[in-house]
Image (cartoon, rainbow, N blue to C red):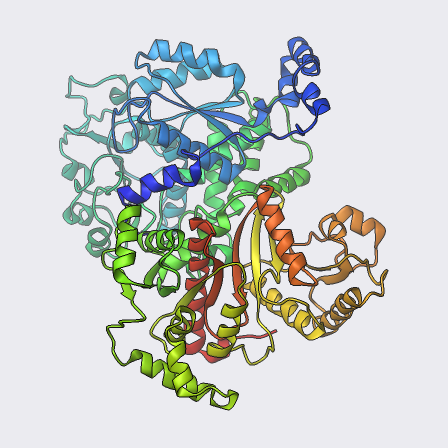
Amino acid sequence: MSKVTKEMALDYHRMGGKPGKIEIVPTKPYSTQADLALAYSPGVAYPCLDIEQDPQDAYEYTNKGNLVAVISNGTAVLGLGDIGALAGKPVMEGKALLFKIFAGIDCFDIEINEKDPKKFIEIVKALSPTFGGINLEDIKAPECFEIEQTLKAECNIPVMHDDQHGTAIISGAGLLNALEIQGKKIEDIKLVVNGAGAAAVSCTKLYIALGVNPKNIVMCDSKGVINTERKDLNKQKSEFATDRPIHTLAEAMVGADVFLGLSVKDVVTPEMLQSMAPKPIVFALANPDPEIAYDKAMASRKDLIFATGRSDYPNQINNVLGFPYIFRGALDSGATVINEEMKLAAVRAIADLAKLPVPSVVNAAYNMTNLKFGPDYILPKPLDPRLLTTVAPAVARGAMESGVARRPITDWAAYETRLRQLMGYDNKLTRRFADQARSNPKRVVFGEANTDNTLRAAVSARNQGICIPILLGNEEMIAKRAERLGLDIEGIEIINLRHDREADRRHRFATELSSKRQRHGLTYREALEKMFDRNYFGMMLVESGEADAFIAGTYSANDKATEIAKEVIGIRPSYRHFASMHILNTKRGTYFLADTMVNHGNDEETLMDVARLTRNSVEYFAHDPVMAMVSYSNFGSSREPECQTVHNVVERMQERYPELPIDGEMQVNYALNREQRDEAFPFTRLKGKDVNTLIFPNLSAANTAYRMMLEMGLGDAIGPIQMGLNKPVHFIGVDQPVRDIINLATIAVLDAAVLEKINANPSARQEK
């Protein structure tokens, strides 16, 4: 992960014209007076009266059952300390964002300017009827203990202080798996805990519930070992005081099996680790730097299992593995509390998931090929989509078995289906692409660096570690533009086509291109003149290997740029055409649309290539394609030439790829409505399947469809993604948002990485 700068963070929080990270979106129709009469007066009176008679009806008529409050007074914010309620708001918004994207839970962040625990409790309790659950956040110890305990006792909805229990649950799952790998029994281990705050106390209590013997625990704070000799202990610390005659952390570590650090960086030395028992387990969770650096720890001994809170090392103890899914299960079962049984159910579900085979989509997200249970993989990865369908049901079952579920789940298969549907509208795919790109950034040329959005995108992509940008344009003009936009372009390579520092490069490129195209009438002199064109020059940088990918900025039409790409880069040998695709993330899931930018009126051969290219691309993005070829006709109902072309291509695709779920031609409503399609056309090869890939009969239809969906706010798009050229060249409008250009640069990096692997192993390319 690249270093996060102040500029990057501030730009992110104010981008898009809507400061902050969350918003409220209506879920019911509101376009007519009749809609508004139902939504408000007079229709709203009826659910109000029903709720007055039966408060449980609030879960049927309002958003209470899917609404969590993230509440803080800002007294212990991340690693920032007591910065106050208002200053902590970005963190609470961020927590609300995580609830939404990982578990589909709506959140209000509430920052309360009150440090007195009793007054704080009164305020939160008074607000509680609004919510289905309360996530307490960033409240300092020891006040957090009183606040949570009181609110759990006095509110009839789930309340959890995630700083305490989140770390406990995730590290508890990691502990179970680490002990299994090391061949140790939990009841026998000697545990050292460094830190005595809210998280440390909660972790230790949960470990005891999992089977750790309290007599084998030594807890330390900033003054050393918490033992019975000390007279300065509060109630929480006294519970863990040892009668052993030891006083320092170094003494406590001798012979220990497990170390849990929730303190400060660099308090543990290699010598301390070497003094531990054979096959030790070390969880160094100080934020942001662990109690001992990863490299030092791993060099100290070979039999160590090591975990931190950081994403750049193996075995990250990350609360996001737990809290979204714990609240999801609690809300869905109507739990009145989050109790010990539910927390232990979450621990075991997370631990068990790490032992299962890792799906390819997770390996791809982290640029790995063989993640499997072992010393460097004791916990699932945060982007594992199975967490929602594993942890939430386990928590819901825990609520039911412990008798706190007011709305028990009876149809578990239907519940899992609903959870899968919740995973549709988010940016997991985008995050996965960005993580892959950051693991192996490539040189990406930006052809229109003289425009604001392209320059912003190039700088942001550099700052995020996604790519190594190369800008085409005038150095002075780009520098002035960067200064006006407040962008730091230091260290970014700029190539001025008119005054290239490499004097012979223009001539070299002209020689290469004219040699390649000499049988197509291109002379050296003509090729030399073309090298003043950004698209020609940028693509030749890629063709010659001096860059890895090119982003061509286009204006109202992209015909010129695509023709240049055919001329300079060329189309893959097994195709006669190339095409483009958009990925749309919507509330209903991820959809792939083609061809959205390149080919106009499609004959059979063109449409055949589009379908083949799209099938390969969808598989590349770790999805199983279920393809519908759309038209205004259904399965031969019209004999118009365009419909017949689509009909014929479907037949050819089915004959060539009998295993591929593809059918058509069909109207788009039948493509997207499985029940309607299966009832009207029970013979279809798509029966029982949800379509995720749409092939349109022509450019006009495809381009209109995706642009209309975006303008209506029905989804987010990545693209246009080029399919079929020999090297990574992509096209995007210069007026597209910065985010879209960054996403396309990310795709270009992934393309370049795949090409690099293919060049190293030519047999790796499989054309279908």
Q: Position of residue 607 (x, y in %)?
A: 68, 69
409 to the left or right of 245: right
Q: State the residue in front, 117 or 48.
A: 48
Residue furthest out toward the bottom: 519
**What is the total number of numbered labels drawn onto the structure image?**
0
Examine the rendered structure and indicate whether residue 407 appears above or below residue 647.
above
| Residue 2: percent from left, percent from top | 30, 52
Say which residue appears at 63% left-offset and 68% top-offset: 610
Q: Is residue 19 left or right of residue 345?
A: left
| Image spot of residue 444 (x, y percent) | 37, 64
Q: Quadrant of residue 46?
A: top right
Residue at 70% across, 27% down: 32
Reply above or below: 244 against 682.
above
In the rendered image, which quarter is residue 571 located in? bottom right
Q: Quadrant of residue 652?
A: bottom right
The C terminus: image quadrant: bottom right
Instruction: From this view, report whether residue 356 is shown above or below residue 564.
Output: above
* Residue 309 seen: no
Mark yes or no: residue 489 visible.
Answer: yes
Residue at 58% x, 62% y: name it.
597
Q: Position of residue 426 (x, y in %)?
A: 52, 43
Relative to residue 15, is residue 703 drawn left or right? Answer: right
